[in-house]
Structures are given as C-alpha cells and as structure tokens.
Amino acid sequence: MRFDIVTLFPDCFTSILHSGLLGKALAKQIAQVHLTNPRDFTTDKHHKVDDEPYGGGVGMLMKPEPIFAAVESLPILPRRDVIFMSPQGQTINQPLLRELATNYDQLVIICGHYEGVDERVLNLVTREVSLGDFILTGGEIPSMALINGVMRLLPGTVGKEESLKTESFEESLLDFPQYTRPANFRGWKVPDVLLSGNHGKIARWRFQQQVERTALRRPDLLKKWQEEREQGTGNGEKIP
C-alpha cells in the first residue's frame, strides 16, 4: 500500500515511521510512505500557505492552491482514497481501518492546520476522518494513528496474524486480560485457570472476561455485540 501524506510538517513523521513494526513494514516494502509539503507548491516569495478568512473571524485558513497542487502532483493508483483529517469526519474505529487496509492500494491523507482549510479543498476529498471529539493543533497526530492502524493490518506487518483476530474491537468485545511470567508478582497472582493447561477452560474464561470487561467499560459495545449475536453475526457464533 502507498500512503501519501500532505503535511506542512513532514519532520513529525520521522520517528514513528522508523520505529517498531511500522519501520519493519516499510523496510520489507509492505507499504510505502511519501511526504509532500504544500509549502513547496507556493508561488509567492514568502511561500505563504495561509490567509485570513473571508467574512472575518479568528485565526487563519490554509489556502486551497498549494493543497490542490500538492495532491495533483501525486501518482494516482486504481484503488485510491483521499482523506482529510478533520474533527468533523467519521471517527476512526477498527472496521474503518480494516476497510481501508482491504479495499485500497493508496491513501492520500491531508493534514490541516491553523483554523482549518478553505472549504473548496473538500472537492479533492473522498472522506473526512476524525480521531475523536476533540481538537488538536493539526492533522499530523491523527494521521499517524490512521497510518499505524491501517499498516498493522496489512499482510506481513504483524508476525502472528492470528493474534489480530482476538484483539479489542475486532468482534465488538474488548480483549481479555493477559499475563506473563512471573506467576506471582508482588502478591498479584496469575489466575489458576491460565496455569491449568486446559485449553477449553481457558477459552471459556477468556470469553467470560471479555463479556464482563465490555459490560463494565463499554456497555455500548456490549449492546452491539448482543445485537450481532441475535442476528447470527460477529463472535456470537464463536462462543466456546
């Protein structure tokens, strides 16, 4: 997959793209990330990318010309999505990440700044995506989250792809608690069932923990899971 990030601050991406699984995925050419700065497409001597909004108001807006020029300079792959990171967009969730990882070969991600972008920039965009109901200084951090979430779903990024199927949000239930050595740490013991070697009991215990944890922390997700179970979809079909 090819990621094209249109950003005024390409240096923000240096560390995350060279760290952990993302760095390994890029080294193995599972994905490519290209950074494009709209400032490089300005035509005035000051390389101005923002201006005052018509009608007055606080703050500045990113101008349309540099963004259009930056996006139009990019290659176009057949399965392409152009995303604007915006608090007004659909919230990132696991189904969205899986859709993007499965259905597209190229994601163009536009990072806004200041008070936002000129509304006409949205003519370039096929969808708006948000990290949540809060405001950040720019679209770089949300875009990093999107890239991370999509890239780890690409075949070959995660060593044991089977582990992706049991994570939180994959089947509308939160993940079960997990433990490693030592079996007793400062008086906190690993549940006996996990030491039993009985895989059937372990599977039932884990499922029960998923349901209880989701009911406690995310009752909205539990309701969704119950609805999926009634309809015969989701992990309601996989009860141990």
Image (tube, rainbow, N blue to C red):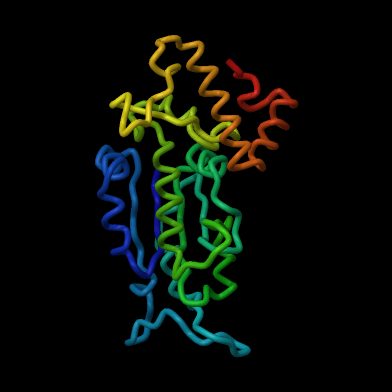
Instruction: Locate the N terminus and report the quarter of the image it occupies.
Output: top left
Q: Is residue 158 left or right of residue 146?
A: left
Q: Residue at x 60, y 30 (%)?
A: 211
Q: Is residue 60 left or right of residue 232?
A: left
Seen in the picture, residue 83 relative to 234 is either above or below; the reply is below
Q: Residue at x 46, y 72 (%)?
A: 113
Q: How many marks?
A: 0
Seen in the picture, residue 57 relative to 229 is either above or below; the reply is below
User: In terms of image quadrants, where is residue 40?
Assistant: bottom left
- Where residue 228 appears, as percent x and y from the top left, is 69, 30
Q: Is residue 17 left or right of residue 111?
A: left
Q: Residue furthest bottom?
A: 56
Q: Residue at x 40, y 39 (%)?
A: 152
Depth order, front residue of 58/121: 58
- Where residue 64 appears, as percent x and y from the top left, is 50, 75
- Where residue 12 appears, as percent x and y from the top left, is 32, 62
Depth order, front residue of 43/227: 227
- Where residue 117 appears, as percent x and y from the top left, is 52, 73
Instruction: Locate the C terminus and report the quarter of the image it occupies.
Output: top right
Seen in the picture, residue 54 relative to 211 is either above or below; the reply is below
